[in-house]
Amino acid sequence: MVHIWIANAVVVAVAVGIHYEFLYQLTRYLPRLQIKHRFRIVVGVFASLFAHALQIWIFALAYHVMHHGEDWGKLAGNFSGSLTDAAYFSFTTYTTLGYGDIEPSGHLRFLAGIESLTGLVLITWTASFLYLEMRKDWSLRADDE
């Protein structure tokens, strides 16, 4: 059972680390862009979407490996065993949408639960980051007018 906790912790740590690094680099990079302030936010949104997609694919790879491994559990339902299906399941889990057409069993349920919590926290973190970046823009624009 310890290996389940370690595997889940590693996947979450990689996702959080990626997210932190993306937001940190955006904090450094956005002010240097020689474009209008409002377009910097658009760059931030697209970079954040890319970061979230990358994190979702990390979880998808974990589901794929665990599904095909021994004693990790399975993904069942409308699932062919492909990495693409694992990514679809990961996207719906990370965003807490959860259509329910693919269901985890066994120890994969733990990863699905922690992915939902991780996704909720990281999406909220992104929203807070983008809000603060927009506030900077609004404060600068109010001072300029």
Image: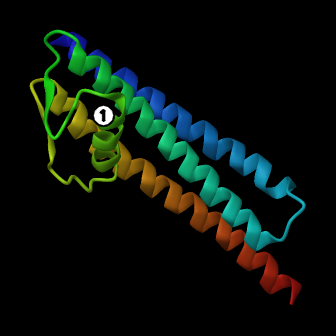
**Residue 67, image x and y in percent?**
22, 21
Front-most of residues 6 and 70: 70
Q: Residue at x 44, y 48 (%)?
A: 122
The answer to whether any part of residue 108 appears in the image is yes
Report x, y in % for residue 64.
30, 24
Q: Which of 96/82 is in front? A: 82
Residue at 47% x, 27% y: name it.
14
Report x, y in % for residue 28.
Answer: 77, 47
User: In this view of the protein, which residue sits in the foreground, 4 or 71?
Assistant: 71
Side (left or right) of 116 relative to 21: left
Q: Mark 1: which secondary structure?
A: helix
As drawn, 8 above or below 19: above
**Is residue 22 shown left or right of residue 3?**
right
Which quarter shows the N terminus?
Answer: top left
User: Would you place residue 44 above or below residue 69 in this image?
Assistant: below
Q: Which residue is mark 1?
A: 86
